[in-house]
Image (cartoon, rainbow, N blue to C red):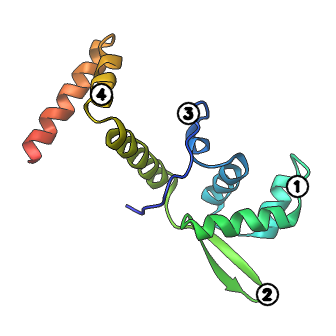
Amino acid sequence: MKKFKVNSFRPSESGSRKVLGDLEADIMDLIWEREIVSVREIHAILECNREIAYTTVMTVMSRLSDKGILQKERDGKHYLYSATITRDEFSQTMLASMIGGIKDDFGRKALAFFVDSLTEDDETLDELERLIQEKRKQS
């Protein structure tokens, strides 16, 4: 699984917006749909819904590349960008980073809170128990 650092966490947001800015998330959504793109293509699509400078899109895509989420390859005078990880891999990495950070910061309290939050739903508790048994068998 590809690693990248989660620098901020916005719990009130959904999906990739929990750890990416709004523009970063919009750009990643477009790239995951198209696979290989230029800044010009992404800018043209984004500009249909909002006023945005080409240089802003270029800067954000370059920073996503610096973070290791995108890779860029020169194509003549321009760069072509592609995701280094799939949307699912991104979600897994994001979850691992967030949960790992919570576990490191709060230890057993985090685990107890997590289990307490599941106690109202028997189906979810059953699933948790199944996952624990499965994990024990693997050890």
Whole-Å distance between the Cαs marked 4 and 2?
54 Å
Whole-Å distance between the Cαs marked 3 and 1?
26 Å
Q: Earlier in the sequence, mark 4 or mark 3?
A: 3
Is 132 or 96 nearer to us in this picture?
96
Q: Which residue is mark 1?
A: 52
Amino acid type, callout 1: Ile
Amino acid type, callout 4: Lys
| Corner quadrant of residue 17 | top right
Q: Residues within 10 Å of mark 3 (few under 14, many from 20)?
A: few
Q: Are marks 1 and 2 in contact (CB under 8 Å)?
A: no
Reply above or below: 1 against 72: above
Q: Give the residue at x 86% y 46%.
A: 49
Nearer the viewer's eye, disc 1 or disc 2?
1
Tell me residue 98's x, y (percent): 43, 43
Tell me residue 138's x, y (percent): 11, 47
Q: Are marks 4 and 2 in contact (CB under 8 Å)?
A: no
Nearer the viewer's eye, disc 3 or disc 1?
3
Q: Earlier in the sequence, mark 3 or mark 2?
A: 3
Whole-Å distance between the Cαs marked 3 and 2?
40 Å
Q: Tag on residue 109?
A: 4
Q: Which residue is mark 2?
A: 77
